[in-house]
Image: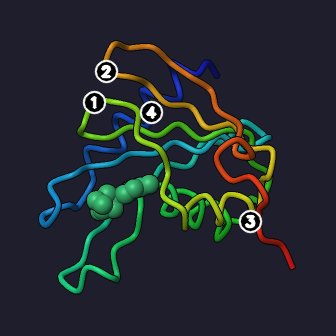
Amino acid sequence: MTNTELLSIADKAMENAYAPYSKFKVGAALLCKDRTVFTGCNIENATYGATNCAERTAIFKAVSEGQRDFEAIAIVSSSGDETFPCGICRQVMAEFAPELKIILRSSSGEETCYKLMELLPKTFTL
Ligand code: THU
């Protein structure tokens, strides 16, 4: 699975985003170590606070199906530019995969692979 392929799966997942409030659609594709891919989109709510991000949708789908070994996650949004995961999603990623790779695509089409620990240094752990 290439970064480009994972990003295209995230593009497809973004089509299911439910974002009537922000109009900001997000898609994610989570690659497990066994090469399974789980997708996610953001799912908003009239209460706003009950909104779930695309990344956590994908991670929670995977964990609920018994998968906990993650290699990479590709994230895209309707901005068309690099969309970094929010703080809560970074913390959820760190719970299962401190070594996770985060694959983003800029508006010029450049793909960059970040390490989760670059984005969440000095992570809280118990
Ligand atoms: N959102 C995500 O899905 N992932 C992020 O990492 C950042 C924000 C969603 C939540 C909300 O539906 C919309 O983007 C605007 O914040």
What SS does tag 3 mark? loop
Mark 1–mark 4 CB contact (< 8 Å) = no
> Which residue ends up furthest to the bottom in the rendered image?
47
Quadrant of the frame with the N terminus: top right
Earlier residue among tags 2 and 1: 1
Q: Which mark is residue 107?
A: 2
Q: Is residue 38 left or right of residue 15?
A: right
Q: Nearer the viewer, residue 99 or 117?
A: 117
- What is the crowding at mark 1: few (fewer than 14 residues within 10 Å), some, or many (at least 20)? some
Instruction: Check if mark 3's residue and mark 1's residue have beta carbons within 8 Å.
Output: no
Residue 66, numbered label = 3
Q: Look at 31% across and 44% down and name the residue there.
A: 14
- Calculate the distance from the C-alpha at mark 2 to the C-alpha at mark 1: 5 Å
Judging by the rendered image, the residue that carries numbered circle 4 is 9
Mark 3 vs mark 2, CA separation in Å: 35 Å
Depth check, mark 4 against mark 2: the one in front is 2
Neighbor class of circle 3 (other Cα within 10 Å; few <14, some 14-19, many 20+) is few
Q: Which residue is mark 1?
A: 80
Amino acid type assigned to the residue bearing label 1 in the image: Gly
Cα separation, mark 3 vs mark 1, equals 32 Å
Instruction: Give whichever of discs 4 and 3 has the lower sequence position.
Output: 4
Look at the image and tell me in which quarter the C terminus lies: bottom right
Foreground disc of the pair 1, 4: 1
Sequence-earlier tag: 1 or 4: 4
Tell which tag, 3 or 2, sits nearer the viewer: 2
Residue 20 lies, in percent from the top left, at: 12, 64
State the CA–CA distance, disc 4 to disc 3: 21 Å
> What residue type is disc 4 on?
Ile
Within 10 Å of disc 2 (Cα), the crowding (few <14, some 14-19, many 20+) is few
Most extreme residue toward the front is: 122
